[in-house]
Amino acid sequence: MKIVPYTRNHEFKPMMSMMNMFDDFFNRFFEEEPDNSFKAMPMDIIEHEKEFELLSNLPGFSKENVKISVHDNQLLIEAKCEDKKEEKKGTLYRCERYSGSYRRSIYLPDNADISKIQAKMEDGVLRLSLPKKEVATPKEISIG
């Protein structure tokens, strides 16, 4: 049992409690707390000198169940994992393994060369390599 000391801060003050309520609401509104009903695909994006590297955790997914596409400079990654139907011989007390789908889209930078994107799936980690385009040097025009 935990004992909490009593303080007079808990007295009823109508205006202060309303202000605290608004403060709590707006403070929680901007916090990013994980929502257990939504499964987001964890992703790291690393910029190197000549490429962008994108790493996504997809444990339990095979490469056949992952679809990657680019449309209007937007990268879309979709992954589906379907639970195999088996005859259960015991009582299931807890089910934590995820069965469903992930979907994540990100806008690519203008200097990403989408025609040369490479993907590799190894040990439940999807690795995308997005090479950078050569930067066009500005051309100086002389007045004749």
Image: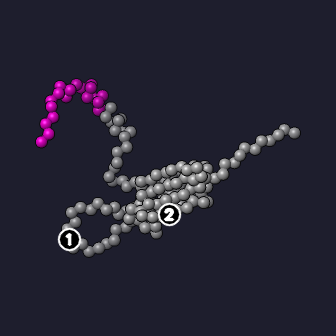
Tell me the quarter of the image containing the N terminus. Answer: top left
**Tag 2 residue:** 120
Q: Quadrant of residue 7?
A: top left
Tell me the quarter of the image containing the C terminus. Answer: top right
101 relative to 127 in the view: left or right: left
Region rendered in magenta: 1-22
Q: Earlier in the sequence, mark 2 or mark 1?
A: 1
Q: Is residue 64 magenta?
A: no
Percent x, y for residue 108?
55, 51
Residue that appears at 44% across and 60% down? 125
**Tag 1 residue:** 90
**Structural distance between the alpha carbons of marks 2 and 1:** 38 Å
Question: Where 16 sits versus 80, above or below?
Answer: above
| In this view, the mark in front (2 or 1) | 2
Q: Secondary structure at mark 1?
A: loop
Residue that appears at 44% across and 53% down? 43
Residue that appears at 34% across and 68% down? 83
Work out whether residue 132 can be spotted: yes
Residue that appears at 31% across and 72% down? 85
At label 2, the amino acid type is Lys
37 relative to 68 in the view: left or right: left
Q: Are marks 2 and 1 in contact (CB under 8 Å)?
A: no
Question: Where 97 sits versus 132, above or below?
Answer: below
Residue that protrudes farthest toward the right in the picture: 144
Q: Secondary structure at mark 2?
A: strand
Q: Is residue 13 magenta?
A: yes
105 relative to 95 in the view: left or right: right
At label 1, the amino acid type is Gly
